[in-house]
Image (cartoon, rainbow, N blue to C red):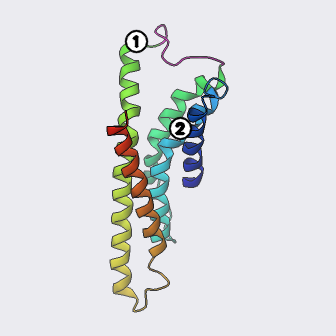
Amino acid sequence: MFLFSLGSATLDVIINATNTVDEHYRMIAFDELSRFALMPALYLSVLHYTSPDKVFRKREYLHLLPFLIFFICASPFVITPRWTFFNPGVFPSIFKTVLQLFIKLSIPLQMVIYWLLSYNKLVRHAKNIQLVASNTQTINLRWLKFILFGILLMIIVNLTDRIYGH
C-alpha cells in the first residue's frame, strides 16, 4: 500500500510536469487520494514489522479515515465526466476554501506526524529487543531505519519546496 501510494504521488508529479492534466484529469483524483494513504500506510507497515504477530484492531484502521473521506469526496469527480466538486450550485464557496485549506495543510501535517510516530515505534522496538536478545543483528530492523531517514529527507525537501518554492 505504501509503495502504491508513493508511485501514485510520483505519477502526479509527472502528469503536472508534462502539462497533460486535461488528458488525465481522472487519474489526478486517484493520485491525490494516494497522498492521504501514504503516511498512514508507512506507520501501519512499521507497526507490522516491529510486531509481526500483531493483529490489527479496528481502532488502527482509523488512521485511514482521511483517505476514506477524500475518497468519498473525489468519487463523483472520477465517475462523472468534468464534474466539479467546487460547483457553487452544489456547495457554498466557503466549503471550497475550507476543503482546499484542509487538503493543503493535512498532507504536510500527516507526513510529519506519521514519520515521528513511525520513528518512535522503531526506537522503542530497538530498546525492547536489547532487553530480550543478546544478538540483535538479525532483528534490529536497521534497514527500516534507513528507509525512514530517506523518507525524512523527502519530507524535508517537500516542506522546503512548499515554504520557499512557491
Q: Which residue is label 2 attached to? A: 33
Task: Answer above or below: position of 61 versus 20.
Answer: below
Q: Compared with residue 128, is residue 19 higher up or lower down, i.e. above or below?
A: above
Q: Residue at x 35, y 85 (%)?
A: 130
Q: Main secondary structure of the magenta part?
A: loop
Q: Residue at x 40, y 63 (%)?
A: 149
Left/right placement of residue 11 relative to residue 165 reads: right
- Tell which of 68 and 85 is nearer to you: 85
Residue at the farthest top position: 89
Q: Is residue 123 visible?
A: yes
Tell me which residue sits at (38%, 86%) in the image.
132
Task: Give coordinates of residue 131: x percent, y percent.
Answer: 33, 85
Q: Position of residue 23 (x, y in %)?
A: 67, 25
Expressed as whole percent of the image width and height from the top left, the position of residue 41 reads 50, 53
Find residue 92 and name its label: 1
Quadrant containing the C terminus is: top left
Amino acid marked by disc 1: Pro
Tell me the amino acid under the disc marked 2.
Leu
Q: Is residue 79 above or below residue 7?
A: above
Horizontally, residue 129 falls left or right of residue 64, namely left
Give me the C-alpha separation between circle 1 and circle 2: 23 Å
Viewer-side residue, 76 vs 145: 145
Q: Secondary structure at mark 2?
A: helix
- The disc placed on residue 37 is none
Q: Please state the extent of the stretch shown in magenta in the rendering.
A: 81-90
Q: Residue furthest bottom?
A: 134
**Residue 93 horizontal/vertical position (percent):** 39, 13
